[in-house]
Every structure is written in structure tokens, then in C-alpha cells.
Amino acid sequence: QVRLVESGGGSVQAGGSLRLTCVVSGYNYSRYCVGWFRQAFGKERERVANIDSNGRLRVADSVRDRFTISRDNAVNTLYLQMNALKPEDTAMYYCASTQGASCTLIPADYIYWGQGTQVTVSS
């Protein structure tokens, strides 16, 4: 059974930091693209960052220079380090995986999803 379990969300003030963790089990995680998405209330889900099986990174312009995505295949874990958080970063954050080695921007291409972890940034 494939499982993706996020943790690390919480409430912080603007300018603060959080580190999200996603532990993956049930499939050969290292072969596939994995990424972080977020969905704010009343908005569409958007890609934050992803990393393919070769370690190539793609990060949304809105979080570039503030967020860092990384993966540790030895422990089947994906991370998102978030610094200099802004109120507009408030959202539910999800980790997700495709069934391919390459990454896309489209949430529908990601077939495995975690349950999400809430990030709230106050001004």
C-alpha cells in the first residue's frame, strides 16, 4: 500500500521558518518525481516545487530563494525547507508523486498524495 505522510506544518509569524517532511512507503520512491503542492482556501492547488529521479529541481517563482526542496532516497523522505515565510504562503501543503521519472506542473499527473499539513503565516 502506497502511503505519503506529511508533517511539520504549523503556525508562524511572517519571516519565520518551517520544515515540512514527507515520508513515503509502499513503492520504489527513488524512481519517480516527487513534489510539494499547496492549496489556499478558495484557490486552486498549485505546484510549489518538485524534484525528479535525477535530482533536478523546479521551484515556483513565488517561493524561489525562500523554499528549498530536497529528497533523501535512503530513507524515502522528501523535505521542504521554508524560510522568510509570508502570509500569502498560508495553505494546506501536500506532497505527491508521479509514476514517471520526470516532473510536470499539473496536479493531475501526480497519482499518489499525502493527506496534507497546514501552514499558517500571520502578519
Image: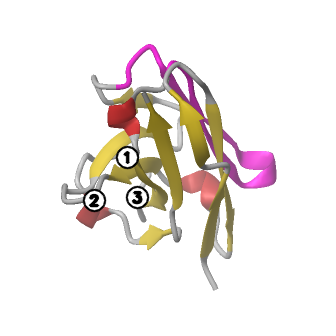
Which residue appears farthest toward the front when viewing the image? 123
Label 1 belongs to which residue?
102
Label 3 belongs to which residue?
100
Q: CA distance from mark 3 to mark 1?
A: 6 Å
Callout 2 environment at 10 Å: few (<14), some (14 to 19), or many (20+)?
some
Residue 107 circle label:
2
Q: Horizontally, is 121 left or right of 2 in the view?
A: left
Q: Quadrant of residue 7?
A: bottom right
Q: Quadrant of residue 28?
A: bottom right
Which residue appears farthest toward the left when viewing the image? 43
Quadrant of the image for the C terminus? top left
Q: CA distance from mark 3 to mark 2?
A: 13 Å
Q: Residue at x 46, y 60 (%)?
A: 97
Q: Residue at x 47, y 69 (%)?
A: 113
The x and y percentages for residue 122 are 46, 34
Q: Residue at x 59, y 24 (%)?
A: 16
